[in-house]
Amino acid sequence: MSVDASPEAPQVQQQSSLTTAAARNLATTTKSAPQMQEITSRWLLRVLPWVQTAGGAYRVNRRLTYTVGDGRIEFVKTGSQVRVIPRELGELALLRGFEDVDVLTVLADRCVQRDFGPGEVLAERDTPSDRIHLIAHGKVSRVGSGRYGDDTELGVIGDGDRFGESALLDPDAVWEYTAKSLTAGTVLSLSRTEFEAVLAGSPALQAHIHEFRSLPAQRQNERGEAEIAMSAGHHGEHQLPGAFVDYELRPREYELSVAQTVLKVHTRVADLYNQPMNQIEHQLRLTIEALRERQEHELVNNPEFGLLHNADFDQRIQTHSGPPTPDDLDELLSRRRDSEYFLAHPKTIAAIGRELNSRGLYPDHVDLGGQKVPAWRGVPILPCNKIPITKEHTSSILVMRTGEDNQGVIGLHQTGIPDEYQPSLSVRFMGIDDKALISYLVTAYYSAAILVPDAVGVLENVEIAGGRG
C-alpha cells in the first residue's frame, strides 16, 4: 500500500497588469533641489548692521582714557595681541613721574606677550629673577616660605597687577615666591636686558633712574607711591591723582577678510544634465551657503577680528558655579548698556533652560523677524553653533550691542565689487581648462568691528554637560 505524501504544488499567479517597477521607466520622477545639512540659521549675519567699507579698511578712532595713580596697569587688546599702554608704565615704582612718552613707548614695544594655561609656573621661588611680569588677564597665586620653612599663601593677583619689578635694576635679584597660574591668561614680560638697552640710549631715563635710586628707602613701596607725599589728618593742599585722557596713537584698523573657493563643473554635465534643474546654479547656491557658514565662523572665532578673541578683558566674566544661571546672565547684562542679543551654542541654550527650570523660572519669548525666540530680561537668546565647545564640555555666551550710532558691533563689507552676485560676494568666470572643466572663482569679503570695549561681553567657562540630579 503506497501513500502519496507530497503536498500540492503551489499555483503561480499570472501577471495581469504592468508592474510599478516597469512603469517607473516611463514616468517622470519628481525631484527636490539639492539639500545641504550644513546650513544653519546664521543669526549673527542677520542681526549685524552691515557698513559699507570703501577702500577695504575701517578705522576705529577711540578716546583713550586711563588713570595713572590707581595702582593698576591697563592694556590695549587688538585681536589676539595685547599691548601695555605706554603711560601706564608710570605705575611702576621706578618709572613713577617719568613723562617721556617716546621712551615709555619703546619700553612698551619691548614687552613680550605670553599666553598661559591654568597650573603653569610663571616664576620659581629662590631662582634668579631677570624680568618683570605684567598681568593683562588671568589669576596668579603666590606661594612663599613661612616662618618655619613651610609654604604659605601670599595671596592671588590678577588683571593689572605685576611682579618682579626689582629685577629690572638688581642683577642679583631672585624670586621671593613661586607664582603659579590659577586660570588661563596673558602676561607681558620686560627683561632686564631690554630695559638696560633702552636705559643706555636715553639720558632722560638715566637721570630719572639716578633720582629714583637716591630716594630714601622708607619713602617707597612696591606700588611706587613714595613720590606722593600723604599724611593722615594733613591740613592744607595736597596733590590728588590725575586722570589722563588722550586719543589712541595707533587706532585700530579692520581690513576686510576674504573667503574664497573655486567651483568647477564639467562641460558635459552642464550640457547634457542641465534639465530640469540648472546644475551650475545649484552648485553655486550650495557653494555660497558654505561660504556664508564660514563667514559666520570667522566673525566669531577669527583671532584678528572675531568677537570671542576681541572681547575686552574687562568684559569677560566667569560663571558663579559652572552652569549658566540667571545670576550669570544678569551680571553679563549689567556690564553694558542697551544689550540687544545673546549668542550661545544650542547646547548652551539647553543648559540655560535646565537651570531656569530647576528654579521654577521660564524664559520669555520675543518676536524677532517673525520668529519666536527665547529671551532673558527681554534680550533675545540666539543660537550660534559656531561658538566652540571644549573637550571639558564648556562653552561661552556672548552678549552684544550693535550699530554705529549706538557704539556697538558692526559688520563690514563692500558692495559694488566686480561680478557681484550678492552684496560683497562675487562670482567670477575663470575659463575652461584642457580637461573641459568650467571654473568660477567665488569670493566673499567681510569683517567685524567692535567700536567700544563694552559693546561685547563674554561669559566664559560655561558648563553645559548634563543636568541637575
Image (cartoon, rainbow, N blue to C red):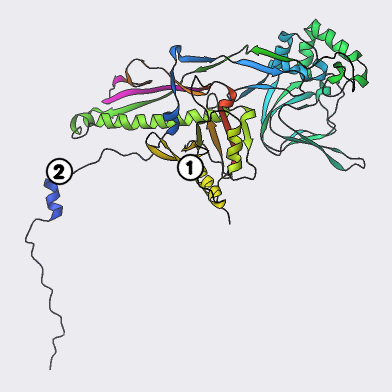
Residue drawn where x is 43% and y is 33% of the image: 43
Mark 2 = which residue? 28
Is residue 343 found left or right of 315 in the rendered image?
left
The three-letter code of the residue at mark 2 reads Thr
The reply to whether discs 2 and 1 touch (Cβ–Cβ < 8 Å) is: no
Is residue 248 found left or right of 281 in the rendered image?
right
**In the image, which disc is placed on residue 424?**
none
User: What is the chief secondary structure element of the magenta stretch?
Assistant: strand
The three-letter code of the residue at mark 1 reads Asp
| Camera-nearest label, 2 or 1 | 1
Can you see residue 110? Answer: no
Neighbor class of circle 2 (other Cα within 10 Å; few <14, some 14-19, many 20+) is: few
Mark 1 = which residue? 364
Is residue 413 found left or right of 360 in the rendered image?
left
Residue drawn where x is 52% and y is 43% of the image: 348
Q: Nearer the viewer, residue 404 or 364?
A: 364
Is residue 371 inside the magenta stretch? no
Residue drawn where x is 90% and y is 22% of the image: 233
